[in-house]
């Protein structure tokens, strides 16, 4: 312990000194502050050349696949449209009834009625056709790869890092190569959707197959199973639950691609509805369409989840199905007699969009001054200092005074006093961190020399995960520098950092509240469910209308999305603590407040840390979306690549985002494990 | 308990079986004639392999299982008893040695033949039951038959038969998660019996159950065996359980067999302190019979006569008041037994006799 | 598995569909569809004309630049409305190589430039002349740009022309990339509703001008065409106005000679497009329906083209 903390001290001292030098002599260090363009490797051109060669050489193969994939979509569409909605209604409600009982059936009925009465049925079916075709394909692909990874250790070692990369590189980054390879049209959306949706299936398949108890395998062997019988009749059915969870996650991922699929191969589907209304800044219309996607996602999620976790597989007879089939037929017949049961008349369609738009307008006109004040406060006192540093953010216009030498001296003295206080108490490392933080805050992330920022990142990685992680972080930082995406990366870091910080603070506070108060919990849950399933493009429009184009709006968008895991994991962690510990603490006579602060929260730290980790991942994935409100981060680079047809630029930015995500992931995981080890608690990861 | 004559040919033989794990496990025994070396040599070899960092799970294990016999392998966790039962069924591939089933070396059969042997000649019961969670009781029991491709009718008929054998009628459509531990193990037993095996392996079948249920299941198991007369290898870490059910038993330690014999032999003549340690807590008077402790001498005339199978415990009150003892009828002959014989038998299990010196 | 169970009847059904629509196998003409409504109208107008000639038509959604790769390669056939100011390097190269054929102008006269709502003229009296912006930048300022004015430009992936111009003529404005068309319009709508300052790069024809009253910033008159790269204060011509071209794939003329003839004749003006855009975007009607309705009312415009193309 002592020697390792000694080493920490040396490392952080070195980093602090380096950062201090960089901040003080920022003007004299030239290439150490701003990474010289001359040292950027021209990677994008070779990447484009390689891609072009690949397309020319193997294009025919992918075009053939594309042609083949067209048919199932066409088929699904014609099937979905041929059957009247009333008949589908019967089928879905029956499925919901079996998967989750009456509550789910009612929810499903309301959701379907929403699609019908708001006039989205036809578009919904077009989107659903894509999902319906992509899910089995993604499941089959994921299952096959998962099985391969299970059977062969070498395959496993190849597959896992690729999955990591695929799940962290934003989908937008690989849209362009898909376009180039598969041509244009709905197939592209399908391919993108499959590629995005299959990784969770692979993971769950591997976890499931590995988790089959030895004795079940042995009992299969002793029953005289051949290798193939052992796999299909013993392993797979035993792993069924985990595999079905994979199907569930694949379904959700596939649905989340509906919008993105529309961007490249838009037909008259719900994603296109959201996109085109959003493009026209029609808040009400896009929200209404976005809700359809959220409802679809929630219904499919609950149904697949319901089938996956039915712990005792009670096999009901065929009777239910026969009743369902009869009602299905009856509904179809009804639709033939009364056309509204097939095609909902235009005149009956509800359209509250104009009212919603007017409502939003009323809000941003009436509360303009308040909203503006909030924005200013956040911008002046939080965002700008972190972005460009106190040295530049503090001005008479913003803080009411200038950053004169006297003020700077005062700042230094305060920092020195705090650091001295810590070192006086023997906490040398925290003292160093205070100084480091103060230095970074003074110069701002964008003003900080690349050498200094890199050193901080690598040192953090070292602290969290030792030498190995530090080397990985170094390699990642080198990639960002050498490919010339350092500046947008820093902006991404800043936006995400602030977003994650706020999400985490507010999210864990809400989560804690919800864990103590059932009413709050019941109110929070549907909200975060909706936030997680609603296409986030929809939220951008009202935010822009209220807060204008720019980073504050982007920040809000990040928070809205990234706050979800922070709330969820905190509540989950606090509610699922070992009963005996709580009982023991209560028996000792703790007050509720003491119980929360001194028993529950410390024990829930691992779960909360996992929430932080997920918050970071969610935040990074939002960068692509926030680029739509005008940020200069890596997400914007991806759009530039997509818009210019420049594979290299888009892909480099995509990989850059993946690298940031993976380093952040490993660092938080590393710290989380250290805390777990210190607390002696183990994380129960099921959520 | 069925008495077995030691002269009959063994149903299953385990001869000089070794199982090594770890890197280069195959290398250690490459040039060694495992059948030709003595016990002491084997022990030294195992030690030298361990010294080189190898992991020895089984050291030169040999025993025979006679037809219709309950052979118990008893040992603490890590003693290698689970490894050896898995070697017998080739769930674990032994590193060296022979497993003879009806005289045929199991280790030499092809994987296809092995599957066939498992399908028809072997059954196995597992500690945590090893049931298929997605199948109900009937389907679980019928599972081995389904794998054989047996027709629906015969399969279900046979499955129902064994289900009623283990007393689970009426629960056929329940799923494992809806059953208690005892019931789940009944399903495991029924499944292993469904193929009508000749050799029956039970790997700590009752260890996961509550004591009361365990006792019930043991009785039930003995009842079944009276009906079925299988050749059984039964693994347990519970010495009392072993005593209750074993015809013969082997005690294992560190992968090697320490002693083989009838329970009484072990109690009366433990080979070392390790075995004696187990026998310490045994309520001997319940285990020992008059035949076990009686002297070889002819009894004086006119004293009470008892059968050899009488528990010593039942005789204690009588012996306490009759110094002349009893006559014990062993087969056709009568032998003499006094309280002195009882005390001598009890004394053999005490290792440290120095407390009282002559 | 259940998948194969559902697949079998599904395949049978697809076979039936195939037999039912034998002609579906004929190669349709693929028309590029971009992101804005005006282009949708041009595309569907073109499609309807091709259908008059008896061709099958497929509308394919494609981004502004990827579509060029697709046309050059032949997997897309026709783009009736290509804005020549919004193309990457690939376009001139492909035209030079002969992979993309430029057939001529569509007839649209687009305008691009900076717009502001009329109430801004009170705060900045010199407008619409761009010179006025030097003095009243603060009237356009926002918290994050103060003391400079705030200028919303095209999204970053559409290029940096406004930002370049601000640099060249030393305007005290900070360019803020609009992010997306939706965000730009949201900003415009909310600014106008709350009478807040706004200066934004915009293009027309666009439906928003039917709904919102705006003025265009005026520039110095250029000598000849405007060279965007060499401007300075006093000689600022603003933006080189785009042309809107009809482009086809290399083999289009040989594969579909009659359709090629139609492409040559086809023509669409600002007035027509503006009316139709309004119908679609404000009255929420289908593009197809609006185009068909207009074509029904104006047969005299396009019937002669069909007749000429059929010869």
Image: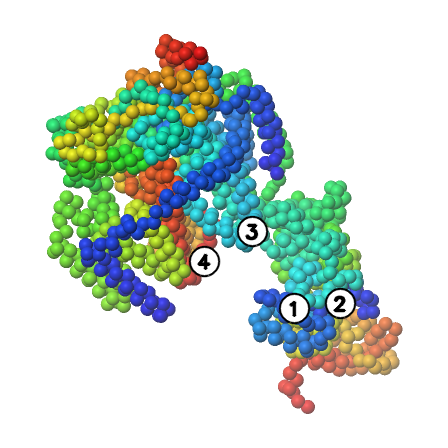
Is residue A469 positioned above or below B351 on the image? above
Mark 2 to mark 4: distance in Å? 47 Å
| One can see residue A599 in this view | no
Q: Position of residue C263 (x, y in %)?
A: 39, 19
In whole angstroms, how far apart are the C-alphas of marks 4 and 1? 35 Å
Chain letter for the residue marked with disc 4 in the picture: A
Residue B244 found in image quarter: bottom right
Q: Position of residue A547 (x, y in %)?
A: 26, 36
Q: Secondary structure at mark 3?
A: helix
On whether disc 4 and disc 1 are found on a single subunit, the reply is: no
Is the C terminus of chain B in the top left, top right, bottom left or bottom right quadrant? bottom right
Q: Which residue is mark 3?
A: A150
Q: Label 1's element?
A: strand
Nearer the observer: mark 4 or 3; the answer is 3
Going 16% across and 37% down the picture, which residue do you hit?
A: C170
| Nearer to us: label 1 or label 2 | 1
Q: Are marks 2 and 4 in contact (CB under 8 Å)?
A: no
Marks 3 and 1, how far apart at CA = 29 Å
Read off the chain for label 1.
B
Quadrant assignment for the N terminus of chain B: bottom right
Label located before the other in sequence (1 or 2): 1
The residue where tag 1 is placed is B58
Q: Seen in the image, is B52 located left or right of residue A682?
A: right
Mark 2–mark 3 Cα distance, whole angstroms, equals 39 Å
Q: CA distance from mark 1 to mark 2?
A: 16 Å
């Amino acid at each position: 312990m002592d020697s390792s903390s000694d080493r920490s001290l040396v490392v952080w001292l070195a980093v602090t000194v380096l950062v201090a030098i960089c901040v003080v002599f920022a003007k004299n260090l030239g290439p150490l502050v701003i990474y010289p363009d001359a040292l950027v490797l021209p990677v994008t051109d070779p990447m484009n050349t390689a891609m072009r060669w690949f397309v020319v050489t193997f294009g025919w193969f992918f075009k053939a696949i594309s042609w083949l994939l067209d048919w199932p979509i066409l088929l699904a569409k014609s099937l979905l449209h041929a059957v009247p909605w009333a008949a589908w209604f019967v089928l879905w409600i029956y499925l919901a009834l079996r998967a989750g009982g009456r509550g789910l059936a009612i929810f499903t009925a309301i959701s379907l009625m929403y699609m019908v009465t708001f006039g989205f049925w036809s578009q919904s079916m077009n989107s659903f056709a894509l999902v319906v075709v992509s899910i089995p394909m993604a499941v089959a692909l994921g299952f096959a790869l998962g099985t391969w990874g299970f059977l062969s250790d070498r395959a496993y070692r190849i597959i896992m890092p690729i999955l990591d990369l695929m799940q962290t590189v934003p989908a937008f980054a690989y849209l362009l190569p898909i376009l180039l390879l598969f041509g244009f049209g709905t197939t592209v959306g399908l391919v993108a959707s499959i590629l995005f949706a299959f990784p969770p299936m692979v993971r769950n398949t591997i976890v499931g197959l590995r988790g089959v108890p030895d004795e079940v395998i042995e009992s299969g062997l002793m029953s005289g199973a051949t290798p193939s019988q052992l796999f299909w009749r013993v392993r797979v059915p035993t792993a069924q639950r985990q595999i079905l969870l994979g199907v569930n996650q694949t379904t959700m991922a596939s649905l989340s691609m509906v919008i993105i699929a529309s961007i490249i191969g838009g037909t008259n589907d719900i994603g296109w509805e959201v996109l085109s209304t959003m493009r026209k800044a029609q808040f009400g219309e896009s929200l209404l369409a976005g809700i359809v996607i959220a409802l679809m996602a929630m219904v499919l999620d609950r149904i697949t989840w319901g089938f996956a976790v039915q712990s005792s597989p009670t096999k009901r007879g065929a009777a239910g199905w026969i009743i369902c089939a009869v009602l299905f037929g009856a509904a179809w017949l009804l639709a033939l007699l009364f056309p509204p049961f097939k095609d909902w008349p235009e005149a009956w369609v509800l359209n509250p969009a104009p009212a919603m738009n007017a409502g939003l307008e009323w809000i941003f006109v009436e509360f303009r001054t308040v909203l503006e004040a909030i924005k200013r406060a956040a911008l002046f006192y939080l965002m700008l200092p972190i972005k460009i540093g106190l040295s530049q953010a503090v001005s008479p216009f913003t803080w009411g005074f200038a950053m004169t030498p006297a003020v700077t001296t005062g700042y230094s003295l305060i920092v020195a006093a705090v650091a001295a206080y810590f070192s006086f108490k023997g906490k040398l490392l925290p003292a160093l961190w205070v100084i480091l933080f103060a230095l970074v805050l003074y110069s701002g992330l964008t003003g900080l020399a690349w050498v200094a920022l890199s050193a901080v990142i690598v040192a953090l990685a070292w602290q969290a995960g030792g030498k190995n992680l530090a080397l990985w972080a170094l390699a990642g930082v080198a990639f960002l520098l050498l490919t010339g995406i350092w500046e947008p990366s820093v902006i991404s870091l800043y936006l995400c950092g602030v977003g994650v910080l706020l999400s985490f603070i507010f999210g864990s506070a809400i989560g804690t509240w919800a864990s103590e108060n059932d009413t709050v919990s019941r109110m929070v849950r549907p909200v975060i469910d909706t936030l997680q399933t609603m296409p986030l493009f929809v939220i951008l429009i009202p935010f822009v209308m209220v807060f204008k184009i720019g980073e504050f709006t982007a920040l809000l968008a990040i928070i809205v999305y990234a706050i979800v895991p922070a709330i969820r994991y905190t509540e989950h962690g606090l509610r699922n603590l070992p009963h005996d510990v709580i009982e023991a603490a209560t028996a000792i006579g703790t007050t509720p407040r003491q119980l929360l602060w001194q028993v529950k929260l410390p024990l829930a730290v691992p779960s909360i840390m996992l929430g932080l980790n997920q918050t970071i991942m969610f935040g990074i994935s939002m960068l692509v979306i926030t680029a739509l409100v005008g940020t200069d981060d890596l997400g914007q680079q991806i759009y530039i690549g997509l818009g210019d047809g420049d594979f290299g630029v888009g892909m480099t930015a995509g990989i850059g985002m993946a690298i940031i995500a993976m380093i952040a992931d490993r660092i938080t995981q590393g710290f989380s494990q250290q805390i777990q080890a210190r607390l002696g608690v183990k994380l129960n990861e099921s959520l | 308990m069925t008495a077995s004559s030691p002269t009959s040919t063994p149903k299953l033989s385990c001869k000089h079986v070794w199982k090594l794990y770890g890197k280069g496990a195959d290398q250690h025994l490459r040039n060694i004639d495992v059948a030709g070396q003595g016990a002491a040599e084997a022990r030294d070899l195992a030690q030298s392999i361990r010294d080189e960092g190898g992991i020895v799970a089984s050291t030169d294990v040999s025993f025979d299982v006679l037809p219709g016999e309950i052979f118990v392998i008893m040992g603490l966790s890590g003693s290698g008893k689970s490894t050896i039962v898995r070697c017998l069924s080739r769930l674990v591939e032994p590193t060296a040695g022979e497993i003879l089933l009806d005289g045929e070396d199991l280790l030499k059969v092809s994987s296809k033949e092995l599957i066939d042997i498992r399908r028809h000649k072997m059954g196995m019961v597992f500690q945590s039951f090893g049931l298929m969670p997605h199948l109900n009781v009937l389907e679980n029991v019928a599972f081995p038959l389904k794998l054989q491709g047996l027709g629906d009718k015969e399969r279900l008929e046979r499955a129902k038969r064994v289900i009623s054998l283990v007393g689970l009628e009426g629960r056929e459509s329940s799923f494992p998660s809806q059953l208690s531990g005892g019931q789940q193990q009944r399903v495991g037993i029924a499944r292993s019996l469904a193929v009508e095996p000749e050799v029956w392996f039970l790997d700590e079948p009752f260890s996961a159950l509550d004591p009361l249920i365990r006792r019930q299941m043991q009785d039930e198991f003995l009842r079944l065996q009276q009906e079925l007369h299988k050749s059984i290898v039964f693994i347990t870490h519970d010495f009392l359980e072993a005593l209750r059910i074993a015809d013969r038993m082997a005690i294992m330690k560190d992968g090697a067999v320490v002693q083989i014999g009838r329970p009484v032999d072990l109690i009366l003549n433990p080979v070392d302190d390790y075995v004696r340690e187990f026998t310490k807590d045994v309520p001997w008077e319940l285990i020992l019979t008059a035949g076990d402790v009686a002297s070889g001498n002819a009894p004086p005339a006119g004293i009470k006569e008892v059968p050899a199978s009488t528990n010593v415990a039942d005789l204690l009150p009588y012996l306490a008041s009759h110094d002349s003892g009893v006559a014990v009828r062993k087969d056709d002959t009568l032998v003499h037994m006094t309280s002195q014989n009882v005390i001598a038998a009890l004394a053999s299990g005490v290792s440290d006799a120095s407390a009282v010196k002559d | 598995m259940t998948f194969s169970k559902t697949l079998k009847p599904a395949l049978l059904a697809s076979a039936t569909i195939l037999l039912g629509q034998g002609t579906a196998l004929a190669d349709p003409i693929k028309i590029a569809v971009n992101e804005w409504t005006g282009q949708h109208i041009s595309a569907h107008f073109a499609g309807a004309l091709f259908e008059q000639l008896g061709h099958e038509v497929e509308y394919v959604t494609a981004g502004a630049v990827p579509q060029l790769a697709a046309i050059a390669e032949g997997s897309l056939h026709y783009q009736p409305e290509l804005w020549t100011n919004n193309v990457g390097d690939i376009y001139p190269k492909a035209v030079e190589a002969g992979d993309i054929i430029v057939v001529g102008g569509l007839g649209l006269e687009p305008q691009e430039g900076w717009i502001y709502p009329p109430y801004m003229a009170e705060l900045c009296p010199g407008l619409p002349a761009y010179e006025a912006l030097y003095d009243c930048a603060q009237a356009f300022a926002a918290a994050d740009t103060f003391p400079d004015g705030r200028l919303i430009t095209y999204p970053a992936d559409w290029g940096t022309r406004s930002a370049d111009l601000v640099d060249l003529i030393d305007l005290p404005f900070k360019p803020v990339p609009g992010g997306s068309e939706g965000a730009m319009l949201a900003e415009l709508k909310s600014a106008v509703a709350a009478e807040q300052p706004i200066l934004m790069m915009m293009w027309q024809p666009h439906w928003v001008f039917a709904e919102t009253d705006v003025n265009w910033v005026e520039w110095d008159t250029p000598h000849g065409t405007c060279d965007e790269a060499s401007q300075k204060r006093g000689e600022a011509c603003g933006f080189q106005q785009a042309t809107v071209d009809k482009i086809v794939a290399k083999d289009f003329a040989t594969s579909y000679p009659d359709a090629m003839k139609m492409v040559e004749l086809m023509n669409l003006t600002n007035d027509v497009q503006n009316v139709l855009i309004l119908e679609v975007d404000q009255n929420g009607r289908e593009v197809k329906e609006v185009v068909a309705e207009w074509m029904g009312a104006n047969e005299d415009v396009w019937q002669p083209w069909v007749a000429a193309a059929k010869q």
